[in-house]
Image (cartoon, rainbow, N blue to C red):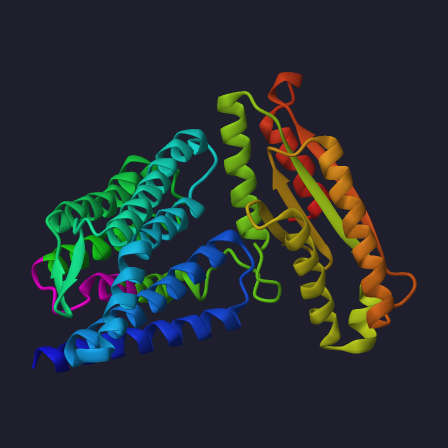
């Protein structure tokens, strides 16, 4: 029954994750939270496969013990990576106000993942039997297995602590739902420590991913359906957060407005190719600026990039690259010769005395949102 139990649980969990990955990939979200959500799904799939391989090796024995060794090595090396992706995903839904404090917190998770990988590697190479070992082809828990399990549970708990401590930084539209990710992962890990016959950690993460997917990840009201970047509502929300953060910390930031002029010549003459043209433009901007910034669509032909760590020369350089890419794309896809890129950089510096409301109205006027 134990064997049948883990097969059913792992198979069902794997199926749910694969379906989520396929459906989310079709959604085409290009923002960082989309990448982190995809990373959680892929990492969970890999770890469940490793768990299944290890259990097959344990059950069959003999020459198949190598499967058990390989599966457990992957699990011990990389299960903290899932914790890293989870905390990174939660961080994606937070504003800029406490970013420096959160960065220090996230570094702690990275240090734990690195130390874990080093300890697992030394344990297996030098045969210390700290975490796990094989004797006569049978898997055994090592003397420090429970210590590592407890530390992993603590670090998963820290995701909840992280979310609670910085709860005021989580964007209001997502605050309540995001707590299910650390809560379910923590519950699953706790159960798995005392019932090793089932991979409940990954089942918990999968259930959390499903809830997040249903709640807002698949149909986020702040994401543009055509391009997969922020829509005007999401862009305005991020602009408000950036202004508030920069005023409180007395830092400056920039809003870079990029517009493809005469794109209507493509839209009007090619029908659905117009949407494809806008998606191509969005892909271009995200690949050049990176998905770590607030990137959103305004109007039919415009994209805005909000950044606080790029110098004017950096922005000008990236704009030049976008212009080159637009020209190359125009030739490749046969767009009308009148299609070209226009750009504008609007800086906000609290030290100049410009009021936040005045700056926001200025940007809204330019974007017409």
Left or right of residue 285: residue 189? left
Give the x, y percent position of residue 351: 62, 17
Task: Tell me the magenta residue range.
Answer: 194-207
Q: Is residue 155 left or right of residue 345?
A: left
Residue 94: image location, x then y, percent:
42, 42
Identify the residue shown where x is 38% and y is 52%: 85
Q: Which one is nearer the viewer's eye here, 227 or 310?
A: 310
Q: Please name the residue shown 77% across and 45% down the image.
A: 319
**Residue 294 shows up from this direction:** yes
Compare residues 145 and 349 and report the one nearer the observer: 145
- The quarter of the picture where the N terminus appears is bottom left
206 is within the stretch colored magenta: yes
Q: Is residue 262 visible?
A: no
Residue located at (10% from left, 49% from top): 143
Residue 342 among magenta residues = no
Along the viewing direction, whichever of 362 and 171 lies nearer the viewer: 171
- From the viewer's perspective, is 37 left or right of 314? left
The answer to whether 261 appears left or right of 257 in the picture is right
210 shown above or below 60: above
Residue 332: percent from left, percent from top: 83, 69
Where does residue 316 sit, x and y in percent of width and height? 77, 38
* Residue depicted at x 26% and y 56%: 76
Q: Determine the residue located farthest toward the right in the rendered image.
A: 337
What secondary structure is the magenta-colored segment mainly? helix
Residue 48 in the image: above or below residue 122: below
Camera-side residue of 367 and 344: 344
Q: Quadrant of residue 133?
A: bottom left
């Amino acid at each position: 029954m134990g064997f049948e139990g883990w097969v059913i649980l792992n198979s069902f969990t794997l199926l749910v994750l694969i379906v989520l990955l396929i459906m989310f990939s079709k959604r085409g979200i290009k923002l960082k939270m989309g990448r982190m959500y995809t990373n959680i799904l892929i990492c969970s799939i890999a770890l469940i496969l490793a768990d299944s391989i290890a259990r097959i090796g344990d059950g069959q024995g003999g020459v198949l013990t190598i499967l058990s060794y390989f599966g457990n090595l992957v699990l011990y090396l990389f299960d903290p990576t899932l914790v890293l992706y989870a905390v990174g995903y939660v961080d994606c839904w937070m504003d800029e106000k406490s970013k420096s404090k959160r960065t220090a917190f996230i570094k702690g998770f990275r240090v734990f993942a690195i130390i874990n990988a080093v300890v697992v590697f030394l344990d297996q190479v030098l045969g210390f039997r700290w975490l796990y070992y094989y004797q006569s082809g049978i898997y055994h828990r090592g003397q420090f297995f429970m210590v590592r399990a407890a530390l992993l549970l603590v670090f998963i708990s820290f995701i909840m602590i992280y979310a609670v401590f910085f709860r005021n930084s989580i964007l209001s539209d997502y605050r309540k739902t995001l707590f299910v990710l650390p809560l379910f992962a923590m519950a699953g890990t706790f159960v798995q420590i005392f019932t090793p016959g089932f991979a409940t950690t990954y089942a918990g993460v999968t259930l959390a991913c499903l809830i997040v997917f249903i709640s807002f990840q698949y149909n986020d009201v702040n994401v543009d359906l055509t391009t997969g970047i922020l829509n005007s509502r999401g862009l305005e929300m991020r602009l408000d957060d950036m202004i508030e953060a920069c005023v409180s910390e007395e830092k400056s930031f920039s809003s870079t407005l990029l517009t493809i002029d005469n794109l209507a010549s493509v839209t009007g003459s090619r029908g659905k190719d117009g949407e494809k043209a806008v998606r191509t433009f969005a892909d271009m901007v995200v690949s050049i600026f990176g998905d770590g910034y607030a990137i959103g669509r305004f109007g039919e032909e415009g994209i805005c990039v909000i950044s606080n760590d790029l110098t004017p020369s950096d922005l000008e350089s990236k704009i030049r690259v976008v212009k080159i890419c637009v020209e190359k794309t125009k030739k490749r896809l046969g767009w009308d010769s009148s299609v070209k890129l226009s750009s504008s950089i609007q800086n906000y510096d609290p030290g100049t005395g410009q009021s936040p409301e005045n700056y926001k109205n200025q940007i809204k006027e330019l974007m017409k949102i």
